[in-house]
Structure formats: structure tokens, C-alpha cells
Image (spheres, coloured by chain):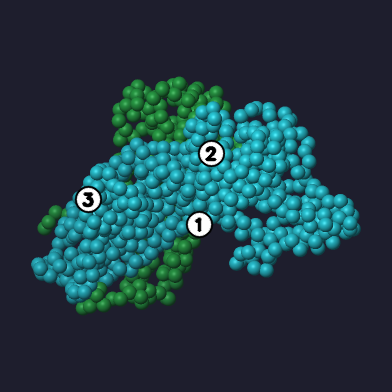
Amino acid sequence: MAFRLKLVPEKTTFDFFKHQYLTFGFSVFMVLASLVLVVTMGLNLGIDFRGGTTIRTEADQTEPVDIGAYRSAIAPLDLGDVLITQVYDPNFRDDQKVVTIRIQAQDGQEAISPDTQAKVLNALQTVNKDIKIVATESIGPKVSGELIWTAVWSVLAAVFAILVYIWLRFEWQFSVGAVAALVHDVTVTIGIFSLFQFKFDLSIIAALLTILGYSINDTVVVFDRLRENLVKYKKMPLRDVMNLSVNETLSRTVMTSGTTLLALIALLVLGGDVIRNFVFAMTWGVIVGTYSSVFVAKNIVLFIGLDRNKEKKDPAEQFFDKSDVAAD
Amino acid sequence: MLQISLWKRVLILIIVLIGIVFAAPNVFYNRVEGHNDALSAEAKGNALTPEQQAAKSAWPDWMPSDIINLGLDLRGGAQLLAQVNVTEVYKARVDGLWPEFRKALADERATLGSIRRVKSDPGVLRIQIGNADQIQEAQRIAETLNTPVASLTGVGQKTLSITTDGNQLVIQLSDAEKASTDDRTMQQSLEIVRRRIDAAGTREPTIVREGSDRILIQVPGASSAQEIKQLIGTTAKLTFNSVIGTTSNPNQATGTDEEILPAADQKGLYYILDPLPVVTGEDLTDARPDTDQNGYPAVAFRFNASAARTFGDYTQANIGKPFAIVLDSKVISAPTIQSHIAGGSGIITGRFTVKEATDLALLLRAGALPASMTFLEERTIGPELGADSIQAGKLAAAVGAVLVVVFMVASYGLFGVFASFALGINIALIFAIMSLIGGTLTLPGIAGIVLTMGTAVDANVLVFERIREELRIAKKPARAIELGYERAMSAIIDANVTTFLTAVILFVLGAGPVRGFAVTFLIGIVTSVFTAIWVTRLFVSLWFARRRPKDLVL
């Protein structure tokens, strides 16, 4: 027999409900903790959402960057809230020192004025005359206000669309379970951004939507098997059918999460610092999304219960041409 | 049976081949880009330099030459989001109405009493009449000057809204006219911004209207957004006005027919001007940098025939008096009229540098913006940062791909090899479609492709796992493979439709780089379902037909 990497044994009979109160309690705790974090610590909102300017500078120097010197050089300009951070990345050369400077939105200005930018550069060049600006991004309060709403709407719209689709394709209990899992994923992801105070900007919203897509993908695969097994084992208790379904799809869940994580981790490590937060959100989301489809979505369905006398026929059979799939 | 009908096999192969052919130019990105640049230079009628000739022949003409556009975050460049202050146009329109109304009302002075304009908000014309009881009559006269709106949406509506307020007529643009004015303002602004940026000679700028009153400007390769801002942020509204007097007090009380504007080059000096211009920059037919008699930089201009006549008459009547050349609400010079200026040409002197004179000439040639712009957002990405990002993205994608392939082959053996080939074809298809639709690849887009590599194998995994299960319950290989595909189908469809939904929402609501991510992600979902269901299946079926294995280890 040829060698096969098997992360999951051929037949598993894990009881995913054995510690259901523990796992479910853990999920609830994580969601609540995330909410508390967001309320108490807040999010490190990027300029997409609060307006302001980010300036990325680069200097050719081998000696470490003195952030204090940058700060005192800029202080006399009186620009209000200024945040200076050094950026590290394995792709950088030894003599490449990158710093980002975030400046709050200036009163009475939308995007940064040419003067302000020139003044910042002049001030920085007193620290090191080789400092150059490699990228600037400036967003006025008007646009950032709109972006917040777009972001909120897009996440809500996505959740709603999924709710309706799952409801149409399965039972309403499934869609409640799926959406609970999605809310869990989104909240916990936002929570970790609050905990580590990573920059939360528009790209993170894109990542959240991707996570929604990924997590629902996972959940749907389990649900699909559950639907099939409910027809097959009419007398088996719901809880056992669910366990069976998760066990049967476990190998697939692990494989897909595995390949996705491998690709994402490559990107996280090597993809550069510009998209690191974005990739981090997705990586974290894949982990959380996998967890939630195994431990959250179906638990909710079990709590609600299913009316098993009116099983839906698999609608896929109604609209897919099966002639080449099963021309036996 | 496991057989796929011949026409389907052919169709799958054709799609795959087309995909590979159209993805190919992206592998030779620089070469194809050079080729395309040379072609577009040739199309403009320019003679090609030897380098351009070489670039042109470096890529064969019969090959497709569509390549993916690189987003600003990869190529470097500048992006601006400008809001056009459309309401400014109302003021100029309404101010222009005053002489006409004054004349019409003054003809009935006997019944209406004295007529004068009183101060009001910009964009509103308030006319006070002496006999308050005749206000209805004044309104009737004013209405005779009102015209229907000349637009499809505003049929049946008038251009002006004329109401009364005590002894005053309140005249402003009607809502329908405002809407059609806004639309015109936007179109003019777009056109003028385009002309200015083209004149500056940058390559492939994107200038599009966004929403009702915004313009998105992307200029690849621009070294900073500030530069573009200076170019397009200047309204360049040039007028020639009569000078009534000068003052040092900017807040000096003025009559309604006067306005105070600062001198551009002398602090503390203000001119009192007649706000109605004699001629304006719109009447210019040409403007170019020049020097004055002392050798200082200046801008030479030429008026069209009717403005030349107006200007000639005006100068003839006002010899010895000063007139002001006003640019964007600043008096750049106020020469005294020495003689009758016929012929409609002249020069503008100010204390220009050579560059300022050149820029001003360019701006005057391109035309004035109908309204000023506020910049809501700007981004500049240096070309080095873009190049670093491409490098990092390529490396990450390559490593990610290798890891996924190793993992798949280790887990599924030969079937893993099939899935890996399908993955390669999938990526080729993504690039082919992106190139054909003129899509833009952004850094998050690269992340989207990498993510697709991870998830693209999902459909294969679903099928393979299902085949394993079917084999376990002692099905024959052929039957197991068939059932594997058949039974995994509903999960594949449901899983991908839901993912597709979120990607569509991302596309509709996202902006900029996020939208770039959504596009690659959407295309990736479609191509990955195609490759997983059809391409891998084709491989499996061809292999099976040759080998006819008695038992299958998966």
C-alpha cells in the first residue's frame, strides 16, 4: 500500500458533544470576552475609519531607528495625535529601516495639504538626511465616516444573504446555527484585533467577509452531510447523526483547513508587511471558522431541535443534470 | 460509467488551452508591456525609436497581448479622490442673471419703484423693489424671464425658482436645474481633469466619476499625489475685470456691484472690482509661455473673435484706466490700459517663475474647472515599495503553491498529482480571465489568489474523501469514483454559492484594493469549481480508461 499522509484516521468516532457545555461555554466566553475587549480597549482604527494620514518612510541606515528622535522632530509641527511605529519584515535589507507615521486628521482639512507633508519630511530629515517618503495615504473625515458605514453594511448584508440562502437550501434551524457560527467568527476576530491592538482598517473588513465565506463553506459541508444522514438513518437520535456527520467529514475539514492554512502561512511570513494584518485576520479566521463549524453551528441546531418528520429532499437533485454524474 | 462524452472532453481541453494561451503574456510581463507601449505609440502616429522597434518585435503579433493591469499598490503611483464643489456654479449662474432682471424690472420702474440687489447667500439673488404692494407684479415680470429646463429628467420644470419675501424677490436655480447643472459641471470637470493630466504626459491615467459629485483619479508612476493635486487642484479661472479702486482693508464695506479681491504678489493690497468680467478664460483660443519686454516669464494668450471684439471695445472706451487680470480670485496683475488693444492677443505678466508660467499656460489651454475641488482622499505609493510588494507576493505565492502541492500529493498520491495540475490550470485561468476583462491585480488580489490556492483544492478534497468512503464500503473503483463525484456535488455547490455571495457583496461594497481582492476571489471561485469538477475529473477518467485498475488505493 502506497504511503499516504493521514492526519485523520480512516474511521473516527469522536463524540463532539461529550464536552458540549465546555466547548459551547468556551465559545460564548470568547464572544463575550471579545465584546468586553472591544468596549474597554477599543480598536486601533486605521485612517480608513477615522481619517488622517499615514506616511511611510524609509532610511538607509544600519543602526537602529530612534523613534524618540522622530517624535521630537515632528512635535514642534503641532499636528495633534501622532503615532510613530517602526515596521519589521523578514524581506527588508539590513540597512532598510521603515517607519510609519500616523497623523490625525487636521482641522478644516480633508486630505493632507502639500505644506504639511513637506514640513513633516523636512522635520524628519533633520534626524537623518536620507529619510525619504515611500508612501502616503491620507483620508479625510468625510470619506472615513462613509467607509465605516459601508463596512458595517457589507458585513450585515453578507450575513443576511447567507441566512436566506441556508434557509432556502436547508431548514431554518440550520440557518440560525450557521449565522450563530458566523457571528462567533466575526466577533472573535474583531476581539483579537482589539486585544493586540492591531490596525483595523478596510482591508480587515475584506478579511472578515472572506472569513464569512470560508466558515460558511465549512459549515455547509457538515450540514450537507447531516441532511444526507438524516434521510439515511431515520431512527438514529439527532445527536448521534450529527456526530456521525462531523466524523465523516472530519478528514475533509482537516485537509481543506490544512491546505488553506499552509497557503496563508506562506503569505503571512513572506508576503510583506503591507498586507500582514489582512493575512493575519484571514489566518485566524480560518482557524476560528473551522472550530465554529465543528463546535458551534450544529450545537445550535441541536439546541433548537429539528422536526424530523418533514425532511426536505435534497434540492440539488432537482436542478443538476445528473446524466454524466451517474449514468450507470 | 466514468466516461465523459467526447464533446465535453474536447470542450474542457479547449477551455484549458485558451486559458493557458491567454495567461501566457503575463509570464513575460515586461516584454509584452513594452510591445503594447510601442504599438500605442505607433497608433498615435509617432515614429518608433530603435528601442521601441525592438520592444515591438520582442513579442509576436499573433499572440494575445492582453495583460493584467497592476494596481497602484504594486506599480507605484498616485490616487486622488476629489469632490467637485458643484454648488459654486450656482453662484456664478445666479450672479449672471442680475443684469437681465435689473433691465426687465427697471422698465417697469413706474409701478415697481426703485430696484436694487440686496446681499444674500451665495447662489441666491435677492432683488428689493420700492413699492412692496407691487411684489406680485414684479414676480410676474421675473417669471417671463424664466425658461424650461433643457434636460430629459426635468421636463416641464423651469430653470429658476422665483419666490417673494416681503418686498424682495428671491431668485435661485430650481432643483431640476440644479441637478442638470451638477451633471454638466461633473462632465466638464472630468474632461478638464483628463486634458490636464494628459497634457502632463503621464501614462494610462484612470479618471472616472464616482458617485454624484466625485472624481477618482489614478495615475500610475506619478511620484506624488501632491504633484497631481497642484495640476488639477487649481481652478484656473481667468477673468478680466474693471478696477473700481484699491484698498488695504479686505473687509471694507462694498456695494452689491463690487467685490474685493487680494493682489497675488503684494500683501495688504486689495482691489475693488466689478464682479462681472469683461472677458473670461473660456474665450481663450491659445495660451503659451512667453517673456515680457523685460525678459521675465509671462504667458501669451489669444482670444476668440467675439471676445477679441468685446475686449477691443472695452479697451478703447477705458484708455488710461486700470483693469485687473484675475486668476482664481486673486489679482495677478492690474495694468493700465495704454491704448486700444485690437486683435485679441496679449500677455499676462506677474512675478512668475518659468515653471509657473509654463504651468499656467497649460492650465489656461486645458480650460478652467467649472468649480473648485476638495481632495477627500489621497494615496501615493512609491515604485520601490510596489516592486517590493510584487516580489514578496510572488515568493509567498510560489512557496504557498509548493506547500499545497506537497500536502495534496502526500495525502492522495496520484489523485493529488491530478489535483495539483488542476490547481495550476486554475491559476492560469484566473490570470487569463483577469487579462481579458482588463482586471487590475492589487496586493490584496495576490492574497486572494493565494487563498484560492488553499480553497481551490477543497472541491477535490470533498470528492476524494467521498471516493475513499465509497471504497471503504467495498465499492468497485469505477463505481466509487462515480459516486464520489455524484455525492460530493451538492456540498460543492452549496459551499461555493455561499462563498460566492460574500465575494459579490465584497465587490459591490468594497472600494479600491478591496475590490481588486473581490474580483480575483470571485474569478477564483468560478475557475476552481470548473477545474475541480471537470479538469480533475477528465484526468481521472483518462487515467482510469488506460489503466482499468482492479482496486484503487486513495
Q: What residue appears at the point 38 percent right and 46 percent down from the top-left corner?
A: B203
The residue that disc 2 covers is: B300
The residue that disc 3 covers is: B57
Q: Residues within 10 Å of mark 1 (few under 14, many from 20)?
A: some
| Colour cyan, chain | B
Q: Can I make out residue B507 in this image?
A: yes
Give the percent coordinates (x, y) of residue B547. 9, 67
Give the percent coordinates (x, y) of residue A79. 55, 30
Q: Residues within 10 Å of mark 2 (few under 14, many from 20)?
A: some
- Which structural element holds mark 1? helix
Q: Vertical placement of B134 versus A191: above or below?
A: below
Which quarter shows the C terminus of chain B?
bottom left
Q: Vertical placement of B253 versus B137: above or below?
A: above
Using the rendered view, name the quadrant where residue A196 is placed. top left
The residue that disc 1 covers is: A156
Q: CA distance from mark 2 to mark 3?
A: 44 Å
- Disc nearer the start of the sequence (2/3): 3
- Which structural element holds mark 3? helix
> Which amino acid does the dot numbered 1 rest on?
Leu
Image-based side of B146 in relation to B196, left or right: right
> Which amino acid does the dot numbered 3 rest on?
Ser
Tags 1 and 2 in contact by the CB under 8 Å rule? no
Q: What residue appears at the point 65 percent right and 34 percent down from the top-left corner?
A: B338
Closest to the camera, between mark 2 and mark 3, is 2
